[in-house]
Amino acid sequence: MSAEQHAGAAVSHEAAYGHVTGTAHYVDDLPTPPNTLHVATAWADLVCGTARPDNLDQVRRLPGVVDIIEACDIPGAPDIGAIFPGDLLLTEGVDFHGQPVVAIAATSFRTAQQACRHVSFRSGAAPASVSLQHALEHEDLVLPSRDWGDREVEICGAHTIEGALLIGGQEHFYLEGQVALALPTDDHGVFVYSSTQHPDEVQHAVAKVLGLALHKVTVECPRMGGGFGGKESQAAAPACFAALAAWRTGRPAKCRLPRHADMQQTGKRHEFQWQYGISYDIDGRLLQGDLQMHGNCGHSPDLSGGIVERAMFHATNAYAFERVRLRGHHRRVNQVSHTAFRGFGGPQGMLGIEASLDTIAYKLGVDPVEIRRRNFYRPGADTTPYGQKIDDFVLPELFERLLADCDYELRKSDISAFNGEHEHLKRALAVTPVQFGISFTVPHLNQAGALVHLYRDGTIQVNHGGTEMGQGLHTKIIQIVAAAFGLPLKSVRCTATRTDKVPNASPTAASSGSDMNGFAAYNACATIIERMQDFAREELGLQDDLVFADGAVTSGQTSFSFAEFVQQAYLGRVSLSATGYYATPEIHFDKERGEGNPFYYFAYGAAASEVVIDTRSGDYRFLRTDIIHDAGRSLNPAIDRGQIEGGYMQGLGWLTCEELVFADGRLASNGPANYKIPTADMCPATFNVTLHDRDNAKPTIRRSKAVGEPPLMLAISAWCALRQACAAAGNTLPHLAAPATPEAVYWAIQEARA
Amino acid sequence: MPQLRLNQQLVSVPDNRLTTSLLDLLRETLGYTGTKEGCASGDCGACTVMHRDAAGQISTCNSCITPVGAVLADEVVTIEGLRGSDGSLHPVQAAMIACQGSQCGFCTPGFVVSMAAALARRADPAQPLTRTDADTAIAGNLCRCTGYQPILNALERAATEPEQNPFPTTPLATTTPLATTTRATAATDETATYLQPTRLADYLGCRERHPDARLVAGTTDAWLEVTQGYTDIAQILDISRIEELRGIEVHDDRFVIGAAVTLAELFDFFAERDAYSAWSDTLHRFGSPQIRARGTLGGNIANASPIADTPPLLLAMGATLILQHDDGSTRRIPLNTFYQGYKVTALTAAEIVSAVEVPVLPPQAQLFARKYSKRTEDDISSVLAVVYSRADANDRMLELRIGLGGVAATPLVVDLSSQVTGATAQHAVATTQAQLQTLLQPISDVRASAAYRLAMARSACAEALSPPGLRLEHVS
């Protein structure tokens, strides 16, 4: 294989060997000095009110307890909120059940956890906003509402639908829980290993709570055992706890959240209520829409502003309304502050419109696929409600290709025959598209840096601001760098993300990892190559452009091995290290007015999911899923396929078996025994994934497209299929809750039959 | 000092570590960090290790909820022990790389171990692996990244490779025979922390000398007190290896199943008996392979959880428990009088369940079970409904008993035989449904609403007494 092919080749994950042999280190696997402390947190059994520990003197005397930290002990500022304030430890009242009140450092993990259980509290309960419903009734907000689009819409005429869909949240359930290890440095600083998607933010948070300048704090993320958005802002707290303990005691300190604490203390995907009024014509074309997204933000904003915004951006998915008004509300509920989760509000926005199109299709007696086809953006109706013109709209082509590939028409009639023959079992097949905007909607985050070092034996280290959470970012970066220098992949090593190598890095989020860091790494390579060109021309007298291929550097008839050439360049005093930088072009957005070009481009996909339900129980199975997804010119088809399959299954979990249950404000689904993510048997019996392999119209790195988040929303097809199967069991298309647990499906069947 | 046979080496383990989690020993003391902690509750499989018992049976367990002492009689292999002595990858490891089976990689060691164990214990490696076999092999392992397809592909690929058993041909001999520290003489060893008698007589001796030792029979539930509640258990009396409790006797009219028979063994027993598919279907969805390998029938019964899955089956079949008293005597008690309230049973402090007598199904009798849960694999029942029915040659009802889990504070049995004698199936359904509506008062909780639980109990009765049709899991 020529080196050029390394970008775009389906190579395995760079750490796959370490994964399968158990030798890949995660933060909790790193060897720790023998005097390392372990930090745990204690909380009061209270949803809202005040709580003060009243027996800390006693707890302090427990064997193994070394330090107890209260908010008043924080040397810097207690606030670690990513964008909006949010305190590390209780400074005022309790705002959610599980909120840390004190942190205890002890000589072992168990001792710290046990000590926390000894803490008793003097507490007073206050009235709580215990549910989204409560917050809706009381106009309880954490941020002002947004109102975009056409305020004059009127939902009237012969054909209208209106109502509300409650869409559940989701626990990230990364297999590796939140963890950080802090080591005091000898120059009054701190070095923190953190499992985080955003080392820069952890650096800021640690510096802030310790009252240090940023250059005193270094953060490294070796790799994560899954992130999914849950280690963007949420990783700061454990890192700060570890850093505080290290700072105060001068000893290394680790903070690892046990699963139940992780589930209670870290934010989740926002629950939403999607409230709608929609008018349409006799053919099912969307006329006017009045769409409101009510996000359950938890007790504080965290990243909720951007998340509600993204729900609004994607509330019309790929469809043109004549006029539409979009409103977004940030509801305050006394729950943990909800946070980023793959899709960042987009999935919740999209589910509502897809559900609505099915409702319209059933009302008109038109195939749901045809209703979608009729409403896609089209010439003359190709501007989003927020004013971005849709060009390069590959969806109709991709959608038709999927329908043909999955035998849609034939299978529809087979399904209909099956349903006629079986009293208790009903099948359905639904197809839904995804149009997902790529870019951070906060403009300044759309920048990235990279650092490339060439060593004299011809090997390369690359470092960049992105983090590796399993998505294969490091693999893609290695491919990009190897391709730039015409080297085999083994010549390039991607090192752990560190704030002292690439500063001020954005979170690895918004699917932007490879787009931004990939280009930054490429630009670093280009800088070195340019220096090499100059050197070859000026010092070696080689006039032809250098060609880097197959481990060799060639100019005309002259050829060197790469290592030889690097050695020559070194002796010729050429700098063999360079930084690279990238800022996404063309994006701008006015949040107040809801107008602009928030996205550099869109990623597209469509899925056809077939399900079968048992009407006696509401139980179901996933029979077949066909997906065509647009990853542009894929940087690595194997990794992109993994993102698509994995994203689909994660979305499937969100919409089916994963149910967050709060009882009186307390998280009842607080462990894997009662919060169920998908298992292997849920993977559709037939699962066909195809890449819609074509160049991105925008000049992204090697014309690829971002692929992290968009596939999650392909699972909406499975939810729509479940709802359509319920309809097949009765006479109407019923309401179906999200998640569609077997119980929810059962009740939907009863409604369809009523 | 006791020794653990780990990855073909002998590892000395201090006595005070025998009552701590195997996972903590591996990670914290021995530095085997390839085995991960994902949940510390036996639900995610990231900590899966494999073990082989003295009889050569290969199983997996969740090392997070397995005390070290529990596996001293076994050989243990972790992810670190899977590679060949020359460092070559196990076929499952190679296949996982080739099939892109890892993304974040954190769950991967657990999957690799589960898959390698599943392949190593195949009865006939020449038989192709079915999708159900593959699903079952990894049903106790959660992956949040891949969506499982590439892992299933990897398993399929590895299954065609020559078998590679990570255990040595002959087990290593321990220098301090287990018997001296943890088994036969444990009864006389005042310092023993982990007592694992293999004979009933030794067990009785342990009870006499160590009356305060915590009784366990698999620790799949008990150990949550340690890993979730952070309580320490100073001394354990593990009854899961007592030979007298380990057998299944088959008589003409009854099976006598030892309390220490594991759920995996019970599955194997019933899987060979067609009339008992209600058992094998239910056991197939009981926990995960890791849990079934450690959990015992007696533990499931005596733990008295209202959502335990074997009691409804046993209740519907009219099972009788045999209780072993510390004084050596035994008594029999019908299971339907055993459960007296939430986690309250007829067991006295001086008794354990030693066996269960299960009447064989008479001719014309049917046993039907339906498990209702949010997720098919590895989930706790919202409702488990078991219907035992017997009809005469004219399809008129003779007996009808419904065993139920998840609808009351205890496992429950509703015997409607007297109300439905002579009735047609259709009438029996109507009677049953009306009765259940009145009798059952389930609660709403994190798993299901009261209304759904009631509806499912009723639905199961209708389904049980109707002609069988195509089943959901068989639709292709």
Image (cartoon, coloured by chain):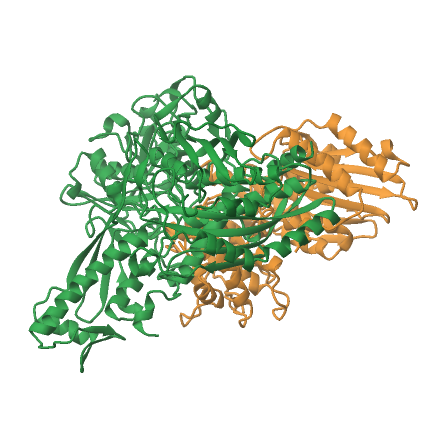
Chain colours: A green, B orange
Task: Report which quarter residue B367 is drawn in.
Answer: top right
Q: Is residue B387 left or right of residue A592?
A: right
- Above-or-below relation of A553 to A355: below
Instruction: Residue B172: give x, y in percent of width and height.
Output: 50, 65
Comparing B260 with A3, the one in front is A3
Q: Residue, x 60% and y 29% (percent of image)?
A: B444
Question: What is the x, y in percent for residue B83?
Answer: 44, 67
Q: Nearer the viewer, residue A553 or B416?
A: A553
Which sits in the foreground, B297 or B368? B368
Q: Is residue A74 left or right of residue A179?
A: left
Q: Position of residue A364 (x, y in %)?
A: 60, 39
Question: In the picture shown, does residue B55 fall above or below B389?
Answer: below
Image spot of residue A26 (x, y percent): 35, 52
**Image quarter of the C terminus of chain A:** top right
Q: Is residue A121 visible?
A: yes
Name the residue: 12% across, 66% down: A531
A353, above or below A521, in the image: above
Image quadrant in which the N terminus of chain A is located: bottom left
